[in-house]
Amino acid sequence: MTGQPIPVIIDCDTGVDDALALLFAVRHPGLDLRAVTCVAGNTDVDGVVRNTLTVLEQAGAGDVPVARGAERPLIEAPRSARHVHGADGMGDLGLPVPAARRPVDVDAVTLLRREILAAPRPVTLIPTAPLTNIALLLRTHPEVTRNIERIVFMGGAVATGNATPVAEFNVWHDPEAAAVLLTAGVPITMYGLDVFQRVVVPGAQVRRLRASAEPGARLAGELLAHRPAAPDPDGGDSDGADSDGGLGDAGAVCAVADPEGLTTRLLPVEVSLAPGPTRGQTIVDRRARPGEAEIHGGHREQAMVDVGLDVDVARYVKLYLDTVERR
Ligand code: BDR
Ligand code: CA
């Protein structure tokens, strides 16, 4: 690694894989984690705050400010993913509540504004959750974009969704907020399901992490064991005995630490806001040339996004393990 660490802020809904992302960000020497903001998503926002503080404590993180953010999407009611992330939203691992850490006494939008504008160099924002806090930030304090280098968000899908056949959970949970994000006017990278689902740690390494004497590495192992690679009935043993574990959101942070592992293409992306079966879909235009719609209807303004299309799986698995196991 050369140069100064990249200032980053993670906006998350911790969340088993958000926890994996935090563990990585705290331990990677090329990243300077300046704040963490919390939003309702995988579980309710108070659960997200608790889980986030617990992870930072277990990871032995420095004094990273954590703030509570939106407790529901802009328009719809919150819809948790506890069936995936457990009743406590973080795998029901029986972790202690945070002993010393507390959230700061300002809300997430205020903390985001403060930390972005105070950073010595432009910040990379890494949302790994529904985009509600980010949309509120962009609408309340648009001046923050002058000190944002880029936004690398986990969300969306080129091909297949998970919350619905076509929509990914983070975008589906708050589609209007995702639409605001895409028009932020800063460079945006979409780390969508197409790459997210591919980065999987083999069972042998998960076992090694779980056996570690070091609490942060051991927690990574427990979280990975809770995260079978394929969320379907034949996708592995979800009690974690021998299963592979997907890095999930942590892959988006790997893409900031090591951008060369992710192949992207600048493409027009639009969020479907219509009610009905396409709501929350990220429509990625991969056509080589304009079609009849453009020929007859004229050009429509669309957000251009660096869309993750391929990922070097072995590279990110190694990067993750090397980083989380280093002390
Ligand atoms: C996303 O949804 C959440 O359940 C995960 O934490 C991830 O951010 C995947 O669709
Ligand atoms: Ca998440």
Image (spheres, rainbow, N blue to C red):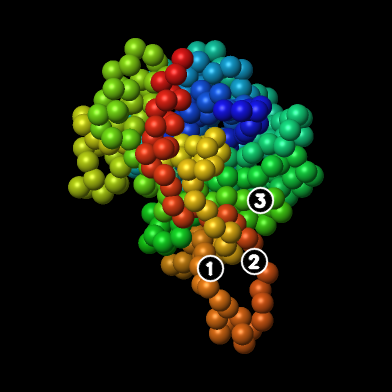
Q: Quadrant location of residue 125?
A: top right
In the figure, is residue 48 to the left or right of 318?
right
Dot 3 or dot 2, earlier in sequence: 3
- Which type of secondary structure does the marked residue at label 2 adopt? loop
Residue drawn at (66%, 27%) of the image: 4
Q: In x, y percent, where is residue 275? A: 51, 67
Could you tell me the amino acid type at mark 3? Answer: Pro
Q: CA distance from mark 2 to mark 1?
A: 10 Å
Above or below, comparing residue 56 to residue 90 in the picture: above
Q: Which residue is mark 1?
A: 285
**Mark 2–mark 1 contact, CB under 8 Å?**
yes
Q: CA distance from mark 3 to mark 1?
A: 17 Å
- Which type of secondary structure does the marked residue at label 1 adopt? loop
Residue drawn at (61%, 81%) of the image: 294
Residue drawn at (64%, 62%) of the image: 303
In the figure, is residue 326 to the left or right of 224?
right
- Which type of secondary structure does the marked residue at label 3 adopt? loop
- Disc 2 crowd rating (10 Å Cα; few below 14, some 14-19, many 20+) is few
Q: Which residue is mark 2?
A: 302
Residue 125: tell me if it is visible.
yes
Dot 2 or dot 1, earlier in sequence: 1
Q: In x, y percent, where is residue 98? A: 49, 17
Could you tell me the amino acid type at mark 2? Answer: Gln
Could you tell me the amino acid type at mark 1? Answer: Asp
- Disc 3 crowd rating (10 Å Cα; few below 14, some 14-19, many 20+) is some
In the figure, is residue 299 to the left or right of 254?
right
Q: In x, y percent, where is residue 292? A: 56, 85
Q: Which residue is mark 3?
A: 187
Above or below, comparing residue 60 to residue 301 in the picture: above
